[in-house]
Image: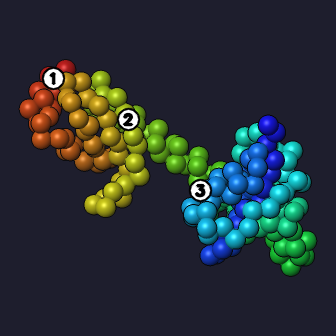
Amino acid sequence: MQLKAYHVQEDHEAHCCIVFATNSAAARRQGAGELGTEWEFVEFCRRAPWADQYAGRRGGVPDHALIDQGWRVPCNCGCDQVIYEDLIHDEEEDCDPVFVGNWTYYNSEHHDTEVAEIKARQELERAVADEARAKFPGAEITYIFHGTSRSNQPGVDMRVPGLQGRVTWQRGDDTVSVQKRDVDAWHAYAQRIKGAA
C-alpha cells in the first residue's frame, strides 16, 4: 500500500509533525510516538496531500516545503530563532534562510558560525586523540569528550591492551581513571610504555 502524508498535532503544546502511513490510525499512533505523547492526547490527525511527494525521502519533508505551507521551523544552529514565511518577507528582519540538506539556518551568518564551530570542534577532537595515541601507544580511542564536571579540558575514553574496562584520560592530566579490576594491568602497561620510551 502507498504511504500517505498526515499532519499530526498533540493537544498540550500544539507540537506537530508530518508522518507517512497507510491509514489515519497508523498515522495517529506513529505521530503520537514521534511527539512523545499518547494516542488520546493527539488533538488531530489530518491528511496532508501536499507532502505525499516526500514519502520515503530520507529526512522526511524538507524545511523549505514546511515553511511554504505556513509551518515554523527552528534554526539548526541552536540560537532559538524560528523561521517562517512572514518573517522571511519582513524587510526589518535579517531572515534569509540557508537550506543545506536537512538543515535550515536563519541566515548565512548563522550557517557560517555553525560551520566554524563544527570545524573547530573536529580539529580539537583530532588533536586530543592524537595526543592520547602518542601518550598511550596501542590504545584504541573509543570516545572523545569535551570536558567533565571536574574539568573543562577535553579527553578520551580508550581501550588499552591487557585491560578489560575502559580507561579515561583528560588533556593535561598525568593520571588516568581505570576500573578497579584493571589497576594491576594498568601498572604493567604503564611500565611497558615507560620502558619503550
Which element is circle 3 on? helix
What amino acid is found at the position of numbered circle 2 in the picture? Thr
- Relative vertical location of residue 18 with respect to residue 21 in this rendering, above or below: below
What amino acid is found at the position of numbered circle 1 in the picture? Arg
Identify which residue is drawn at 58% across, 49% down.
118
Dot 1 corresponds to which residue?
A: 192
Identify which residue is drawn at 47% across, 38% down.
126
Question: Quick one: label 2 or label 1, which is nearer the N terminus?
Answer: 2
The colour scheme used to paint the residues is rainbow
Identify which residue is drawn at 90% across, 76% down.
91
Dots 2 and 3: beta carbons under 8 Å?
A: no
Question: Quick one: label 1 or label 3, which is nearer the N terminus?
Answer: 3
Which element is circle 2 on? strand
For the N terminus, the quadrant is top right
Q: Residues within 10 Å of mark 1 (few under 14, many from 20)?
A: few
Work out how far the residue at label 1 is from the one at label 3, CA to CA, in angstroms.
53 Å
